[in-house]
Amino acid sequence: MNTLTLRAARIVGPLELELDWSTGETLRLDLSAWLRPPFDALRDPALFAQMQVDDWGGHGLNWPGGLDLGADNLYALAREQAGLPTLAAGALGAMRPCSAARNNIPERGLMGILTAGPAPGR
């Protein structure tokens, strides 16, 4: 099984990204509808502009302050927004933001991606 990774990410508008995937797909993603604390800090354009693909081979996006989103979550959300089929929740593993701040995220969000509580095994 191939690991899903980000090849590149570009900011294309306020809270909007264009993401190139290891699958060969390029998908747009609008984060505006689901940014809840602590990720609501990304509404600051100066902070949002500091987005980087993680240093661990494209397994997510990073912002200062420990705000990190995993590639599996981003991929599922981008495909959902594009009207494409998505994998069932959990098919890519624990469908959670990879940030240590994930414990502050309410249990809601598109496709149930964002969940409250610690990651399994913590």
Image (cartoon, helix red, strand yellow):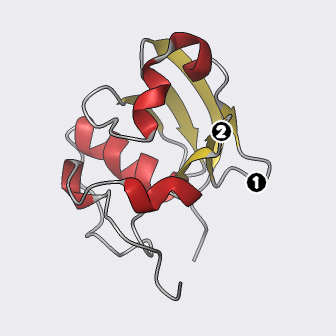
The answer to which of marks 1 and 2 sits earlier in the sequence is: 1
The one nearer the camera, 17 or 100, is: 100
- In this picture, is 10 found above or below 45? below
The spot of residue 31 in percent (x, y) is 36, 30
Vertically, is 114 above or below 119? Answer: above
Rendering quarter of residue 117: bottom left
Q: Residue at x 48, y 26 (%)?
A: 42
Task: Quote the CA–CA distance across marks 1 and 2.
Answer: 20 Å
Q: Secondary structure at mark 2?
A: loop
Which residue position is annotated with label 2?
Answer: 65
Depth order, front residue of 24/15: 15
The amino acid type of the residue labelled 2 equals Gly
- Percent across and percent down for residue 38 are 44, 41
The answer to whether any part of residue 64 appears in the image is: yes
Residue visible at 49% across and 16% down in the picture? 44
Q: Residues at badges 1 and 2 in contact (C-beta under 8 Å)?
A: no
Is 112 drawn above or below residue 90 in the view shown?
above
Comparing 106 with 90, the one in front is 106
The quarter of the picture where residue 96 lies is: bottom left
Q: Nearer the viewer, mark 1 or mark 2?
A: 2
- In the figure, 6 relative to 107: above or below? above
Q: Is residue 19 left or right of residue 5?
A: left
Decide which of 95, 8 is in the foreground and name it.
95
Q: Which residue is mark 1?
A: 57
Q: Secondary structure at mark 1?
A: loop
Three-letter amino acid code of the residue under disc 1 = Gly
Residue at the location (28% across, 69% down)? 89
